[in-house]
Image (cartoon, rainbow, N blue to C red):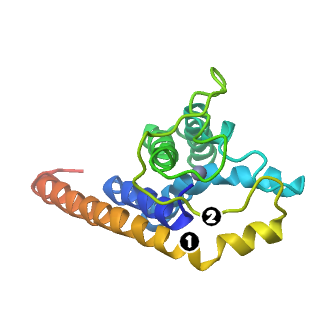
């Protein structure tokens, strides 16, 4: 797994690239940063049974889960605003899937290696044949919450987070630049519109 810092910055980049017509810009950024970290909420049921890694990178790390997340986000938006938003659902599912993409290229330190990407159709695990990111240390099977946290916040994870920053900060800057470009293109239309 990569860290919440790397995943969150990736989600933030998606948020910045897609916030052009969004009034609650900060809320939009935070929503997509959260969506990009959401698959790792699969640690929670493991915490409840005293084996933090028990359900990690299983159903929660699948494309089906990304679609479910997007559908729930769109449903939540409808409940809040009273109308559907394709953008909310699609961006939420994309940010969630960005997590799967990063983890796919992340070194996995324990078997079974990879993620159940095609759950529920397949229970096989998938991972890239090479790694871009050094995996975060997050304990071994059977570890308690204390052991998990001690390893998570150990110095061994600093280099891995550094590599994630090298990859995701340029992505964030590119998203910002792209949005500026799009906003610039749109400006004359807005100025001349009668809305
Ligand atoms: Zn993950």
**Image disc number at residue 157:** 1
Q: Please tell me whether mark 2 sits on a helix, a strand or a loop.
A: loop
The quarter of the rendered structure image containing the N terminus is bottom right
Q: Are marks 2 and 1 in contact (CB under 8 Å)?
A: yes
- Which residue is under mark 2? 137
**Front-lying residue, 7 or 127:** 127
Residue 20 visible in the displayed image: no
Q: Residue at x 41, y 45 (%)?
A: 130
Say if 177 sits above or below 182 in the image.
Answer: below
Asked if the residue at label 2 sits under 8 Å from ligand 1, the reply is no
Residue at the extreme bottom of the image, as rendered: 155
Residue 54 at x, y = what percent? 79, 48
**Front-lying residue, 110 or 96:** 110
Q: Name the image quarter holding residue 149.
A: bottom right
Q: How many marks?
A: 2
Residue 17 at x, y = what percent? 31, 55
Q: Residue at x 51, y 49 (%)?
A: 103
Q: Residue at x 48, y 67 (%)?
A: 160
Residue 53 at x, y = what percent? 75, 52
Q: Is residue 113 left or right of residue 17?
A: right
Give the CA separation, mark 2 to mark 1.
Answer: 6 Å
């Amino acid at each position: 797994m990569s860290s919440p810092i790397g995943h969150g910055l990736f989600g933030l980049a998606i948020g910045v690239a897609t916030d052009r017509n969004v009034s609650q810009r900060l809320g939009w950024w935070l929503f997509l940063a959260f969506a990009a970290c959401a698959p790792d909420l699969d640690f929670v049921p493991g915490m409840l049974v005293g084996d933090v890694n028990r359900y990690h990178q299983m159903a929660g790390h699948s494309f089906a889960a990304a679609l479910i997340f997007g559908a729930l986000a769109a449903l939540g938006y409808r409940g809040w605003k009273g109308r559907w938003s394709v953008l909310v659902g699609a961006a939420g599912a994309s940010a969630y899937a960005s997590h799967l993409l990063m983890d796919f290229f992340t070194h996995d330190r324990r078997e079974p290696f990879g993620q159940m990407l095609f759950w529920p159709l397949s229970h096989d695990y998938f991972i890239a044949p090479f790694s871009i990111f050094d995996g975060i240390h997050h304990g071994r099977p059977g570890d308690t919450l204390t052991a998990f946290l001690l390893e998570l916040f150990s110095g061994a994870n600093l280099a891995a987070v550094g590599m994630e920053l090298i990859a995701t900060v340029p992505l964030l800057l590119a998203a910002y630049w792209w949005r500026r470009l799009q906003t610039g293109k749109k400006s004359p239309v807005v100025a001349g519109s009668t809305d």
